Amino acid sequence: MGVANVWAAGQVGGGALIGRDGELAALGTALAAHRLVTVTGAAGVGKSRLVREAAVREAAVRPPGGPHRTVVRVRWHDGASAGPWAPATRIAREPDTAVGGAPGGGAFPELAAAVRALPGGAPLLVLDDVDPVLADCAGLVRALLADVPALRVLVTARRPLGVGGEHVLRLPPLAPAPAAELFRALAERRVPAGAVDRATAARVCALLEGVPLALELAAAQLERLSPGRLATRLRGGQCWLAAPGAPLPRHRSVRASIGAVHALCEPVVRTVWRRLSVFTGAFTEQAAVFVCEEAGLAAADVPRALAALAEVGVLRAPEPPAAAPPGPLREPRLLMGRAARDFGAERLAAAGESAAARARHARHCRSTAAVAETLWNTGLQQQAVGLVRDGLDDLGGFLDHAARHPVHAETAVETVLHLWFWWAAHHRGAEGVARLLALLPLLPPDSALTARGQWLAGWLAADADPATAHCLLELAWPAAVLAGDDALVGRIAHAHGTLAWKQRDLASAAELYRQAADTVPEHSPGGPGPMVSLAALAVIQTRTAPASAARTARRALAQPAGGHDTWATALAQYALVLADHRAGRTGRARYRVRRALAHLEARLDAPQAHTALARLLRHLDRVPALREPAGPPEGRGARRDAAVPAPAGREAGAAPHGGRGPVRGAVGGR
């Protein structure tokens, strides 16, 4: 068996296909029920090999009382003639021995006549890789199905034929586990067994998105690259993957494989393809239209091009985020495969359009973040979180690009600032700090964004890195005062309050939180409102004055934002529960915390607040009384291990479970 067969669908050394049992069974069922079956899928996904295996099985089937099924296999060889059509009429018991040819010049009538002259039985006509002649092939199939009642036709193409009665089977890339199995098996033909560990194989397969052709080409590189080096290079792109000795030209490199798809696209579709290569994650139709503007396209061109690109496998619907809870319906999104994106980026640079497309993409990302912040501030917080989560990969890709290209630094910092709530409430503080520290040095010296960026980085780092946080806040303070920015002045005071609490200077922390609550204007964008500072102040007051703490917590809940800001409400409820418990009303505290948890779970996905309230409930169920708080009630947004809930502060021996109580690092209310 030639190496092209290995590339086609994940088969090693002529053995069984890896990870395709389900697809083979589905194809067999479809052939039994339908006269025309078309297997579609992206370039390199393994359509030809799957169909070849299915045809072998079909040829071995003996219909009751009849001969073996007769199989005729016709293949288009990358647009180059493989000989006259006459030999294509040869009847083959094994489809791999059939010959192919190039349609045109009256060849289709010859094939039609040959099929009509087949002997009895149940003939199967396999038309492999017909994309270059899709329209002619559709006409041929339509005529043959009408003239030969017993005929069944199996086709591979990147898009359906569009013939009546056609059953389409879409072939996806390999799932992660079989992709890794295939890659390790291919690698062992070139390097000693065990040279590629499971973790590296998983990284390579994720970067290559489970495409068998790309996996074979990558495995071939192990003769000159270590597995780790291969994975590193693949993170920068995959069009460079090549194996010059492959029999078919389009199987000799990833670039050639994707280029074969590109060559069959209309000029408008090619333009949209290269412009969309700036998206590193999923995008909506509206975003695609925005980025493709100023490219000489009509308004209706982009939606039609998106449909065409989805039809040939360049675009696909992304998998829904695993962590996304049920929520409002969201606008459909599309995702471009990495190989197609790398190819499109090459074409974008060759067309001299990279700067324009990148600029529009930067504006789109900033706009997405601004819309998300507006949703958050107006009470649509679940929608805000959903918008950020859906666009997270693309936003991250833009911020990575901006860190390497200072021309987009200001737009990127604005984007990060708009997303303050995401970093603070979703265990993303460390990422927010890292983004800002990479981008702030790239800003112009007189940028008005510098002080706001320093504040946000200092606020997010206050718990994990107090020294860096203090330095950043000290740099931001003079600029905020000189600019007369009350919101920024107040938020810097809140962050300093957190630092004071961490140093156990509770009197200073209380005064700073009070100053922040009195200074930050209500409904001011760009950060948390006074409700958060009041909640922090209330937790401070629970140490010696539970009654005052309860009044402060109720004052927080009475703020104008309290009716729609679920996250801030959870912070204030947290403080009120502590006040009740310290006043000896533990039963009421348990009731309040259960209500707060139910309210939060029903309205918002906020991991920091949920973790803190749940921890507090467990503490109330175990410990009859709390003692002095040891730290701020704010989520450890800057923790580097976001998957592990932030530990609570030590409560001077109050909690039997390792001495940890629910106060410090609790709610994410930076």
Image: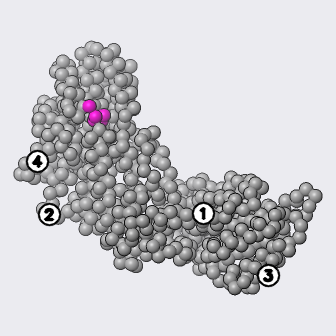
Q: Are marks 2 and 4 in contact (CB under 8 Å)?
A: no
- Label 1: element kind: loop
Disc sitting over residue 87 in the figure:
3
Residue shown at 38% from the left, 58% from the top: 286
Disc sitting over residue 445 in the figure:
2
Magenta part, dominant SS: helix
* Inter-mark Cα distance, 3 to 1: 29 Å
- The amino acid at mark 1 is Gly
- Label 4: element kind: loop
Binning the other alpha carbons within 10 Å of mark 4 as few (below 14), some (14 to 19) or many (20 upward) gives: few
Answer with mark 3 or mark 4, whichever residue precedes in sequence.
3
Look at the picture and state if 152 lies above or below 648.
below
* Inter-mark Cα distance, 2 to 4: 19 Å
Q: State the image quarter where residue 500 is shown.
A: top left
For residue 619, say whether it is visible.
no
Residue 470 or residue 182, whichever sits in front: 182
